[in-house]
Amino acid sequence: MQIDFHFTSIYALSRLAGFTKEEAHTIAQSSQFVDDAIHSGIIFFDNRAAYRMNSAAHKMLDYRNLKELANHYVWIPFHFIPGNMEETPDESIASLFVQKIVCRPNSLIAQKILEKIYRSRDREFSLQLLGVSLHAYADTWAHQGFAGIDHPINQVQGIFEWNEAKPHSHSQRIKNYYADPWWKKLYSWFLSFFISKTFPLGHGPVLSLPDRPYMKWRYVDWKGAMIERDNPKEYIEACKHIFSFLVSFRTGDSFTTNHQLEPQDLEQLKRLFQSLDMEDGHDRYLHWVEEIRTGAFSFGPESCQYIEPKSGISKIDESEKTIDQIYHDVPYSKDFMDSLWKKNYDAITYYRTLVLHEVLPEFEICAT
């Protein structure tokens, strides 16, 4: 999923669940920030204080970084929550462990994470923690069928339009790009080997198709099975579960209570997911912002905008290097402890520890 869901859809769902405008913005901001939290390392302040940052994402260039720890610390907890399913006893391609860490929608592991987040409502950064957890929870629908590690289980044999036998237009665009005669012979190799085998991390082989709400598509998975994906339907299911949890989180009701969206709001969500068919997530986000501004939902017309939290530390905010960095002699500000940037990184660190050290071990999954 992209910013149109992680920010604007989450904002709308939070408002519909009864959160104030300010609270909804905090939740949605933290949800989207998961994709922007690319800094990891330690800040050493000039007063001898220190702060450790843990990233929740990498830049697109780093998406091809195959370091195992990066997979386990970033992709698994924040973007590919394990589904805990063993599909086949045949371990020739994927061990039972690898099969268990394939992402599945609304898995028992994802539900267990939400249960623990629900019981952390009294924390100072609870709304940020809620946003972070909803990012990962929502992605269990979009990223289903793929694992957050570099492994052949993520390879695909073909990508097709919904109810069509022809390859998806992504394949056609690649074919057109390499249409010169001597490139044509490499076309099939490029699709089957370069895309799938060179980018087997997560859903890299199917590009951004899972992250576009309007797409209906099919692909052949690692077992040779044709998998049909109806993104609009899956996104709506995600919205229903997220809304219900948001209401429970706000009111203190049991997190297993099934709270339902009003029919008119549900129809608006369906309309937006199906009609906003721009490939770029930011373009869809801008349309969502306008829909919310003009009163598409029952909470009425409102303005909302994603503003990425910044540290206010130039060494960090302006640095091109983001992974495992050490910053020395950083001027300490008394405002640092209460900054939105710190609260978001606090939530990210808390969430990562919760998932890797508490929840996954309960399911005999060791990813630390």
Image: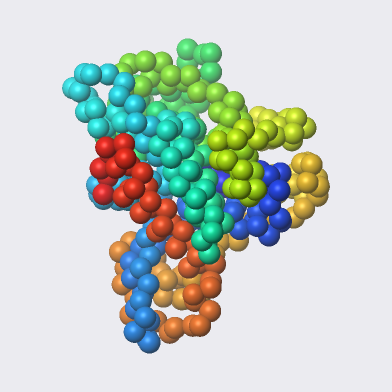
Figure colour scheme: rainbow
What residue is at 49 percent from the left and 71 percent from the top? 311
x, y percent for residue 276 = 66, 35
Identity of the residue furthest to the left in this view:
92
Pick the residue in front: 55 or 320: 55
Residue extending furthest bottom?
Answer: 47
**Residue at image x 34%, y 31%?**
84
Q: Which residue appears at 46% of the width and 76% of the height?
A: 314
Q: Which quadrant of the figure has residue 90?
A: top left
Indicate the position of residue 179 as horizontal and vertical percent values: 41, 28
Give the residue at x 59% y 54%. Answer: 27
Q: Is residue 41 above or below residue 271?
A: below
The answer to whether 89 appears left or right of 128 in the picture is: left
Q: Is residue 179 left or right of residue 118?
A: left
Question: Is residue 281 visible in the rendered structure shown here?
Answer: no
Q: Is residue 223 visible?
A: yes
Percent position of residue 168, x then y: 48, 23
**Relative to 234, is 254 above or below?**
below
224 vs 92, left or right, is: right
Q: Nearer the viewer, residue 91 or 193?
A: 91
**355 and 91: which one is in front?**
355
Q: Position of residue 136 (x, y in %)?
A: 47, 44
